[in-house]
Image: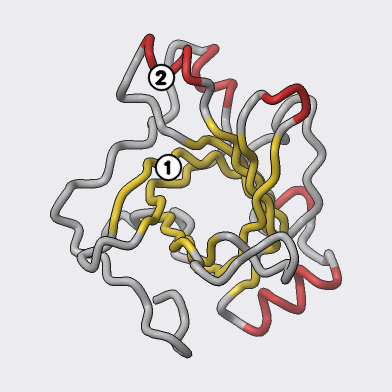
Amino acid sequence: MAEQHSKFVAFFQNDATPQNKKPSLKGNLKLPSGEEYSFPLWAGEQQGGKGLYLNGQLTPSEASSAIRQQLGTQAERDKVGVAPPALTLDVGHIVLFETPAESLAENPKRPKYYGYAHTIEGYFRIGAWEGTTNAGAPMIRGSIDVNDPAAAANNNPAPQPSIPPKDSRVRAPRAGQGTT
C-alpha cells in the first residue's frame, strides 16, 4: 500500500476586509490518512502584539465525515495524536500562529506559521511557509502530521514538516471556483 502524503495550502483572498468579515485565506488540507478538508481562515492579532494568528472551521469533503464531525460521534479510542498544551480546540477547528521573528532568525528553515487542527480523526500539527502561486498571488503551504510530542520525548522524533519544493506549480482558483 502506498504511503499517504499530507498537504496544506491556503490562498490569500483579496476582497477580505475587517468590515465585510470575509476570511483572509481559503484553502484545503489532506491528512496522512487521505481524508480531505476545506477551510476558511480569519486573521487576527495575538495579544501583546506577538504576531498574527489565523483560525477557522474545517469542512470534511465526505458527507459521512461532515455528519460525524457535526454530531461529535467519533469514538475517543479511535483518535490519533494528543491535544496541544494550553490550547482548547473543538472538533472541526484549525488555528495557526505566526512564528516569532526571533525564532525565524535563529533558524530560517522553520515554518512561518505553525498550528493545529482537530478533526474527527484526532489532533494534527501544521507547519506552513509563505509562497506565491504561478500568477504571483500570495499563499501559504506546508504539511500536516499527527500531533505526537511523546515521539520526540522517546528519542524517536515525529516527522517534521518540510518546505514544499519551489516547483509545486500551485494554481490559484479562478473567481467562482473552489480552492482546489
Q: Residue at x 75, y 48 (%)?
A: 77
Asked whether residue 43 appears in the rendered view, the answer is yes
In depth, the one of 79 and 36 nearer the eye is 36
Q: Nearer the viewer, mark 2 or mark 1?
A: 2
Specify the amino acid type for callout 2: Leu
Residue at the far bottom: name it: 176
As measured in the structure, the alpha-carbon distance from the residue carrying label 2 to the one carrying label 1 is 13 Å
Q: How many marks?
A: 2
Residue at image mark 1: 128
Q: Residue at x 51, y 67 (%)?
A: 13
Q: Is residue 130 above or below residue 73?
A: above
* Sequence-wise first label, 2 or 1: 2
Asked whether residue 122 appears in the rendered view, the answer is no
Residue at image mark 2: 104
Residue 97 image offset from top left, x and y in percent: 60, 36
Query: Element type at marker 2?
Result: helix
Q: Left of 98 or right of it: where is 17?
A: right
In depth, the one of 56 and 147 nearer the eye is 56
Q: Residue at x 60, y 42 (%)?
A: 96
